[in-house]
Image: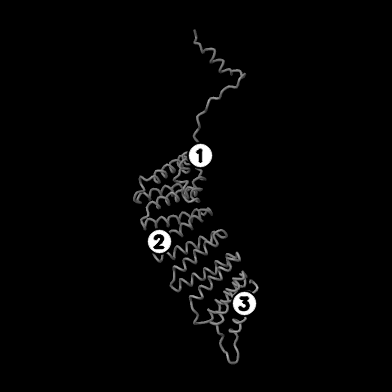
Amino acid sequence: MAAQKINEGLEHLAKAEKYLKTGFLKWKPDYDSAASEYGKAAVAFKNAKQFEQAKDACLREAIAHENNRAYLFQLLKRTYEQAGMMLKEMQKLPEAVQLIEKASMMYLENGTPDTAAMALERAGKLIENVDPEKAVQLYQQTANVFENEERLRQAVELLGKASRLLVRGRRFDEAALSIQKEKNIYKEIENYPTCYKKTIAQVLVHLHRNDYVAAERCVRESYSIPGFNGSEDCAALEQLLEGYDQQDQDQVSDVCSSPLFKYMDNDYAKLGLSLVVPGGGIKKKSPATPQAKPDGVTATAADEEEDEYSGGLC
């Protein structure tokens, strides 16, 4: 079956090359027919799991469309995206992302921002574990596309992905800005409870930056968000800041191990559990428990002195 599909692909390639040749009676290559044959070759190679050849056929199809002034723009975009997916199958992720990005830019130019955003998000997911920095950039680009289309809920979801990757990479300065942008959008769409959670995330990030002033300012500014003052989120943050300011590690740990913090997104929960106050902090002393004396052990001099007067002076 695979050999048959490979031969089929090679036949389509040969036909495509024939369409591109010029001669005495044929002055101009037939790019449209060549592109069609390259497309058929790509499908045949893909079915035979010959992804390298499939990718090459896709790229040749794209070039044929580009050379054809009357090419169908939609076909060209789709061809680059398909070539990118071939590279994904080959685990050549950076190259795959590059082609998908090219396709997404063409979608934008052609006035189809939804498709462009979907392509960019797909590229971000592909590269996230290999190149988180590139994934952040792609998620932010996707968020910008959605924001320009006034689709704020989709935009803020992508910003959230970027923020978590920044925290995971301990790029706290950038993470603080990204979370602030999330918070602004949630405030704009009047999702106030999520604003509270984003304030917690902000405070944790600022404290890991050793910037108590910025953390305190976040809480202070959040008092203007309806319902924040008096919420359990507000009370917990005030306790956290008080403990951090007083270098009380026990108080900070108690707040950060509470369900409110533990059940946040995993990246932020980890920030809470790893938060250490400046200077290592002051731990409360646990009350000393009297230890029983083992059998046969003689009393100390202090014990003997106490026993001497235990019956009184008379």
What residue is pinned by disc 3?
8
Cα distance between the residues tagged 2 and 3: 47 Å
Q: Earlier in the sequence, mark 1 or mark 2?
A: 2
In the image, residue 31 above or below residue 174 = below
Q: Earlier in the sequence, mark 2 or mark 3?
A: 3
Q: Tell me: 292 left or right of 163.
A: right
Location of residue 46 (image quadrant): bottom right
Q: Which mark is residue 4?
A: none
Q: Residue at x 58, y 22 (%)?
A: 293
Q: Residue at x 40, y 61 (%)?
A: 152
CB under 8 Å between discs 2 and 3: no
Q: Amino acid at mark 1?
A: Gly
Outermost residue toward the top in this view: 314
Front residue of this view, candidates 74 and 191: 74
x and y percentages locating residue 263 in the rendered image: 46, 47
What residue is pinned by disc 2?
152
- Category of crowding for the residue at label 3, using alpha-carbon neighbours closer than 10 angstroms: few (below 14), some (14–19), many (at least 20): some
Cα distance between the residues tagged 1 and 3: 72 Å
What residue is pinned by disc 1?
281
Q: Amino acid at mark 3?
A: Glu
